[in-house]
Image: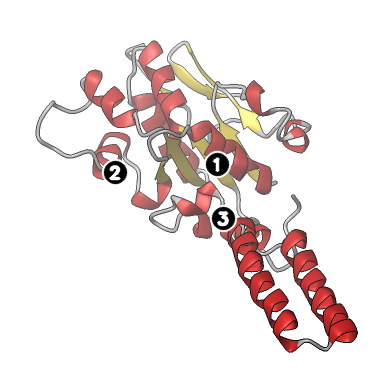
Amino acid sequence: MQPSNSATTLGDVLRQQGKRPKLIPIFLGLLILVAGAAIWWWTKDLKMVASVFGGGAVGLGVVWRHAKPKLPLLLQHDQRGIIDGLVLSEKTILIDGNNIYHFGLDHKVGHKALKELAFELIADGFRIVCFFDASIYFTLRENGEFKKSREKFSIKIIQRIFGLNPDEIYVVPSGTQADDFIVEAASHMPKSVTISNDKFRDFKSRYPDLFKDRGWRKGVSIVNGELLLHQYKFDCPVLFKYV
């Protein structure tokens, strides 16, 4: 979907989607009006006309309630107004938090891969949002990033471990996957870049226009102790001396 001229944030784009009129309720409303007018024309029976309009109104209400578009998931679960803060004209980086964290684990640097990546991108002038599955808390605890204590799961844990601000953290609800949220956001933000080593192949048929742009997603690697973002050069190299 191409954003309209009036849309300035991702939230604007998603809300405009929800405002699209539903043709079925409109058609049924017109049909009820025509039926009532026809009955009055032929019978002049007010009771019959009232019955048609009354029954039609009830039925139309049911149809309209079910046809009414729900807010997209990105907005439904946006507890801190992050989506409304993503300006379409700004350089925005969408980070697959779980994926990059697991990448750090695989390369023996743990949370530092994501932490340093986010820090350098912000320093280079990008607005970032890290999307996490709800399971990130269990994963962090299982890998010793914080102790098994009575500390409740909250974004404060993610803030502390990865050095992120609250408006840079989007944890999707249990039972959903961050991948769905990431690709949906990327599909509406032509100036954004997604960072993940996941190629999101399962989404190609649903978002063909997004996948036509080979630069919408960039992977990361560590070579000789240096964190590399494919097809991008950090202003300051990110080095892990202990790799």
Local crowd size for mark 3, using a 10 Å CA cut-off: few (<14), some (14–19), many (≥20): few
Residue 135 circle label? none
Which residue is denoted by mark 3 in the rendering? 70
Tags 1 and 2 in contact by the CB under 8 Å rule?
Answer: no
Sequence order check, earlier mark of 3 and 2 = 3
Report, in whole angstroms, how far the alpha carbon at label 1 lies from the one at label 3.
Answer: 27 Å
Q: Residue at x 64, y 60 (%)?
A: 63
Residue 16 visible at all: yes
Residue 93 picture location, percent across and down: 55, 41
Q: Residue at x 52, y 47 (%)?
A: 73
In the image, is residue 223 above or below residue 194?
above
Local crowd size for mark 2, using a 10 Å CA cut-off: few (<14), some (14–19), many (≥20): some
Residue 178 horizontal side relative to residue 101, left or right: right
Q: Residue at x 61, y 54 (%)?
A: 90
Sequence order check, earlier mark of 1 and 3 = 3
Residue 126 visible at all: no
The amino acid beneath tag 2 is: Ile
Report, in whole angstroms, how far the alpha carbon at label 3 lies from the one at label 2.
Answer: 26 Å
Which residue is denoted by mark 1 in the rendering? 93
Residue 155 circle label? 2
